Amino acid sequence: MVKSHFYDAIIIGAGNGGLVAAAVAAKQGLKVLLIEQHNLPGGFASSFVRGRFEFEPALHELCDIGPADNLGNSGKLFKDLGTEIEWCSVPDAYRLIVTGKGEEIDVTMPFGEKEFIDKMEEYVPGSRAKTEEFFALCNEVNSALTYLAESKGNPNKKKLIKEFPNFLRTATYSLDRVEKAMKLPEDIKRILNAYWCYLGISTDRINFPLFATMFIKYMQRGAYVAKNRSHEISSALEERIRHFGGEILYNTKVEKILVKDGEVQGVITDSGIEIACKHIISNASPHVVYSSMIHPADDVPEFAKKSLNARRVAPSGFCIYLGLNKTKEELGLKDYSYFVYPTMDTSKLYESMKSRVNPLLQATVCLNNVIPDCSPKGTCIMSFTTLFAENSWDDVKPEDYFREKTRIAQNMIDYFEKSTGIKIKDSIEEIEIATPITFAHYTGSFRGSIYGYETDSWDSVLPRMMMMESDVLIKGLRFAGGAAFRTLGYGSAYLSGETSALLTIKDIKEGKQNG
Amino acid sequence: MDKKLNIKIKPIGLLDIIAFTKMVKKRTSIINAANTKPISPSNVNINALLLHPKKQIMKIVEVIAETPKVKTFVLKMVNDTLPAFFRAGQYVSLKLKIGDSIFTRPYSLSSSPNDSKRGVYTITIKGADDGFFSKWALDNWKEGDIVEVSSPEGNFYYEPLRDSKFVTGICGGSGVTPFLSMAKAIAEGNEDFNLTLLYGSCKECDILFKNEFDRLEKAANGKIKVVYVLSDEKLANYENGFITADLIKKYSKNSPYSVFICGPQVMYNFVSKELSTLNIPHKYIRRELFGEVKRIEMVNGYPVEHLNKFYQLKVNYFGGNTQIIANSNDSILVSLEKSGIKAPSKCRSGECGFCRSKLVSGNVFIVPDGDGRRAADKKLGFIHICSSYPISDLEIELPK
């Protein structure tokens, strides 16, 4: 029995965006084929086993899940799809440690608006009014974005101006500009901005609404991780795709997207198989698609070529995964999430990401503080993450690669030990180190980027969403994932997958009506 | 909050709102101002492919007979590029096509990482009585033959942030090959640790690479020491007997020391018992994978009533499905290979997960030491077919 080789939609890449796109499209009755180059679902959202440990490669925390009685967007999406995922809630927002001379901070901030504001008052007496104002603004921005998404690109302008004036006035500015306009004192700003590294660019460039929605979602609904690492999320979505009748083809790379007269015709895989379709949702980024996949290459529209030169590919990650042969109590690891920076001058930190000399920033987690039994008795799991931008990994020669990994990992562990007084080096039973090259290897992402495109105000979530339709440059080709219109992060990737699937269904219906 | 929020960035708030309405225009004009020159691929992606190629097509350029039953094969890329750089101790999976059937087998690289910069991999194959792949390769592979080689794989290597600088290697038979690579890497300055190798053989004539190790010991300034342990012969300058706790202690003077083990299952079982008397922390004991289980009935917990049975195995893959008869003594992977069905495999030990497949229905026995599955996969009924044995009729879904 040979199945027919025509699909309503082909999804390229089983990352977060691709998985949700395939699940939603299949659920709506489309004949869907998801093609993934790796042998697993998830892309970055995966897991791996070393010795007695199963490690989380990517996720620190998800901000848009929410508790059962207050589901966030991602939480609702998973519920609608019927996924079975065991979510575990993160106890505190973060511990922020700043080590630079004259800048020293060591604070632990909780989730919850009231709790956070109270704690801020404790650390920075007299801060309450200003912090409340910041929260109020973030709330307005978040409501405005929800309204914009619900209005499907046709908002009532009067309503916008009446209900969301502060959103309108801050929407095109950076986090720094808005905080400056609010006259936020430095002491408050430094603590509020700790999450900046989740967005991968400095606060003088991060688009304010993007930061504001992420921040307020964490505060309102807390953060979650899946009990069995991100692989639990990805394999739950994989299960749903099959359940709804979708097909998945692993270990297969889409080499070419066939285009004729500006319309998608199908794909060619690395096994040389041609599969016909009129609709593609690509989890592979525009950089990968437009620079190497469109066939014939002459059919890449000029605006697409220009956009590759105009947009800035976001940083990649460098992670150290440790299985430790002592408990978190024995080691003194009290917190889940540690942001450790030498300074809160984030443009200085971003500059440091452009070279491999010595990564200054780190976001470090001890998973057992969310999932106590995530590792065998008497052990615990830690992971360290830093970011690398631009061409910082271009000049690594393969023969120097392993030594370079070890050198950077050693520096990062040393810095953590020095900043916290916690000694971990003698307890390392398993270690794995992932670099931009690792991320490029497993996902094919351009330069190993884990964050898609940088989110300066001109290319942040709002203009991208407003241009969602005009960015369809080849008929039938839409994007999902961190490089798509919702921007970076698991939650954004899920939502872009959902939206692209729904819009593809609409395209198909309209195509039928017109045809 | 009582006070009405009024935040503006520019002195006149209206300008901020105008900026909002012009976002699309702004993004469009920034993109339009850029040039159309093609994006060149990133070095990061190029290096990812160099370090982790999907496959490497290589030619046998030399066959060296080490002993009557052991041969070393020297491999070079057919297209004159360099094979992937690796960490001393890693393995490659070799592919063998016989008729319509495809078989794979992992072999540790015995060459050094630096050799790969000179264009060369070497692997050494020992003919085991029940090793079908090895026997076929020894009998048939000759100079000029082309073989498909995987990227370097595996985690059996020295890791400075985890291991002691003093490593006691324990090996038997062809388990010596990753240690030869490590010894070369130490002598060439590519790795920085002290290796004391306890190398078990039956008789002196079974020892492999003795001259090579002698040379490396001299070149490494005391960082390498090889102790030959003969079980069936008593000779001067050799230890006699098995690799016991006493012997390990005798040659592991520094504390803490790491123990690296690579050898046949029987040796591993014996050495593990010995090691358990030495109270060495888990973190300091590392072992290479066994490869395929040769006799499933010898594995602890195997339900022997299922031995020598035949089960229906329905296999779904992209584009169709097939029904085959599977011998319960073979892993699902081996049954598929014998039937000429393409299936993914690398480590053949249950660890790497490359053969992850969905068990749609039926029951399997999974080798307890070879259950490297992810927790979510266990819950959702995925199996690694290289370490799963049918104990009922089955239906599975392959990744491709």
Image: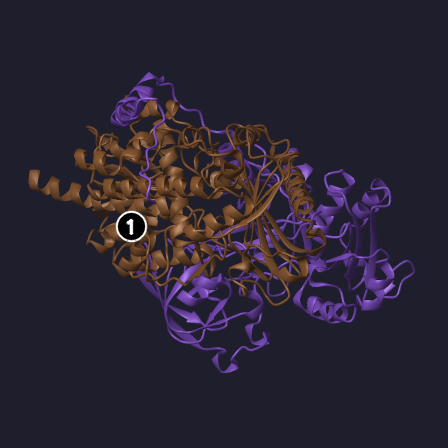
Chain colours: A brown, B purple
Q: Is residue B319 visible?
A: no
Where in the figure is residue A148, as x and y percent of width and height? Answer: 24, 40
User: Chain ID for label 1?
Assistant: A
Q: Quadrant of the N terminus of chain B?
A: top left
Instruction: Count the marks.
Output: 1
The residue lying toward the viewer, choosing from A70 and B12, is B12
Q: Residue placed at 31% from the left, 41% from the top?
A: A140
Horizontal side, residue B65 vs residue A177: left or right: right
The residue lying toward the viewer, choosing from A307 and B60, is A307
For mark 1, does the 10 Å Cα neighbourhood hold few (<14), some (14 to 19), or many (20 or more) residues? many
Q: Residue placed at 17% from the left, 36% from the top?
A: A156
Where in the figure is residue A231, as x and y percent of width and height? Answer: 44, 56
Q: Using the image, determine if residue B271 lies above or below residue B208.
A: below
Horizontal side, residue B351 vs residue A244: left or right: right
Secondary structure under the numbered disc 1 in the rendered image:
helix
> Residue B336 falls in which quadrant of the image?
bottom left
The residue lying toward the viewer, choosing from A117 and A202, is A117
Where in the figure is residue A117, as x and y percent of width and height? Answer: 46, 48
The residue lying toward the viewer, choosing from A437 and A461, is A461
- The amino acid type, in three-letter code, at marker 1 is Ala
Horizontal side, residue B395 vs residue A263: left or right: right
Q: Residue placed at 51% from the left, 33% from the top?
A: B44
Residue at the bottom extreme? B305
Where in the figure is residue B374, as x and y percent of width and height? Answer: 49, 61
Residue with the mark numbered 1: A22
Q: Is residue A491 visible?
A: yes
